[in-house]
């Protein structure tokens, strides 16, 4: 039986690799997607860093507030006049900084001890301007604090008398944990690479062959049905595992494309992490191959199989998002759900945690049982007389 399974495996693997157009699209989408996302994130972070380094404040009516302008310049900020049509430019996202609008009576109210009202104009649809709001608000709070201290000092009151306590922040997250927050997208992309790597091969070796009429001659061979299923499953799983390996390894040179030095320093994904990812994904690739074959074997055409496999694609796309929306930490049942378990474990790898056997065994056991059950279903379906 093993000789027959090996023969079927080589035949299916050659068929899968012969469809070069589909294979090329899967490889490009799976392998190139990770580095492409890294480049886009790098450009976004680089743009934010560039605007932060510029230290520019855009003001309307800056001639009315010399004291405020003096404070800003002492903080090493450059004050620029807002364009006349700043509101329209903010709406059109052509102006990348929020505009601080100062009233004409700013200094008069300030001298009388009253609080002048300033406007900080932005647009929620303008992401560039939104990122600069926090910095301007911190500067205005600093100006408020300085003016309050000057007023207290003029009345002979020590500013420290108003400080009932002092707050010091302490972050318990180590550098590896903070860096892992940036790498949360890596598990999702490699997981999708495994899924789409197995999808086309699984559908083509079952529903595709049935539609082309090449499955019946194969069933007429003396090879046992278990050997046919084992060979087909091995070929599909091999293609999926190959895509998983290429996807994980693609993030290694992809880091060279990071334009932001801070981003490159935070993003930790080396060969050790890549090998750990591959080890976690291999059982899932085998389970996915068997599950997709079980879904497609009952279909009469490739399109029908694609429609039925949409449920699996949707489930495996949504399950990893539980780790994003869950604010209560990892629950024990997360390690028993395919895709979610691998995402959770890969997140621990990125944080530098050591994976115990008790963490890996649940996901491994579920993948083995799922592959065995789906493979048995495919073999039973091939034995049935309904397959004609």
Image (spheres, rainbow, N blue to C red):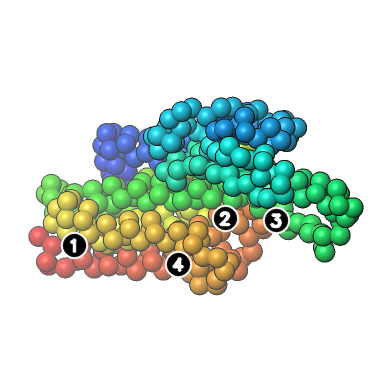
Q: How far from the left and from the top, in percent, is residue 295?
A: 25, 61
Quarter containing the C terminus: bottom left
Mark identifier at residue 337: 4
Under circle 2, the secondary element is: helix
Residue occupied by mark 1:
298
Left of 80 or right of it: where is 29? left
| Residue at left offset 65%, top offset 28% | 78
Mark 2 or 4: the one toward you: 2
Instruction: Choose the circle earlier in sequence order: 3 or 2.
Output: 3
Instruction: Say few, some or many: other residues with alpha carbon within 10 Å of mark 4 (under 14 / 14 to 19 / 20 or more).
Output: some
Instruction: Choose the circle earlier in sequence order: 2 or 4.
Output: 4
Instruction: Choose the circle earlier in sequence order: 1 or 4.
Output: 1
Under circle 4, the secondary element is: loop
Residue occupied by mark 3:
173
Residue occupied by mark 2:
347
Q: CA distance from mark 1 to mark 4?
A: 25 Å
Residue 271 in view: no
């Amino acid at each position: 039986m093993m000789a027959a399974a090996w023969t079927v495996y080589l035949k299916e693997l050659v068929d899968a690799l012969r469809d070069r157009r589909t294979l090329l699209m899967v490889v490009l989408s799976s392998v190139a997607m990770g580095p492409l996302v890294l480049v886009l994130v790098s450009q976004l972070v680089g743009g934010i860093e560039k605007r932060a380094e510029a230290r520019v404040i855009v003001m309307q009516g800056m001639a009315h507030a010399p004291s405020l302008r003096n404070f800003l310049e002492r903080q090493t900020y450059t004050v620029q006049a807002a364009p006349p049509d700043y509101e329209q430019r903010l709406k059109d996202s052509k102006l990348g900084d929020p505009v601080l609008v100062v009233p004409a009576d700013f200094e008069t109210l300030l001298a009388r001890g009253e609080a002048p009202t300033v406007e900080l104009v932005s647009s929620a649809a303008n992401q560039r301007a939104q990122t600069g709001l926090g910095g301007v608000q911190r500067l205005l709070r600093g100006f408020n604090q300085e003016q309050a201290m000057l007023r207290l000092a003029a009345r002979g009151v020590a500013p420290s008398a108003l400080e009932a306590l002092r707050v010091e922040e302490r972050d318990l997250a180590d550098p590896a944990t903070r860096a892992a927050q940036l790498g949360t997208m890596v598990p999702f992309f490699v997981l999708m690479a495994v899924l789409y790597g197995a999808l086309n091969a699984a559908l083509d070796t079952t529903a595709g062959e049935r539609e082309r009429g090449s499955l019946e001659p194969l069933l007429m061979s003396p090879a046992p049905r278990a050997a046919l299923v084992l060979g087909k499953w091995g070929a599909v799983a091999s293609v999926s595992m190959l895509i998983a390996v290429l996807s994980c390894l693609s993030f290694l040179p992809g880091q060279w494309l990071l334009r932001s030095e801070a981003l490159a320093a935070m993003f930790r994904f080396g060969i050790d992490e890549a090998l750990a990812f591959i080890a976690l994904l291999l059982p899932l690739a085998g389970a996915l191959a068997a599950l997709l074959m079980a879904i497609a074997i009952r279909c009469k055409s490739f399109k029908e199989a694609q429609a039925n496999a949409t449920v699996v694609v949707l489930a495996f796309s949504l399950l990893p998002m539980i780790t994003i929306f869950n604010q209560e930490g990892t629950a024990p049942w997360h390690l028993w759900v395919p895709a979610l378990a691998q995402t959770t474990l890969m997140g621990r790898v990125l944080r530098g945690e050591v994976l115990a056997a008790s963490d890996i065994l649940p996901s491994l056991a579920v993948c083995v049982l799922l592959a065995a059950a789906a493979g048995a279903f495919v073999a039973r379906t091939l034995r049935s007389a309904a397959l004609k």
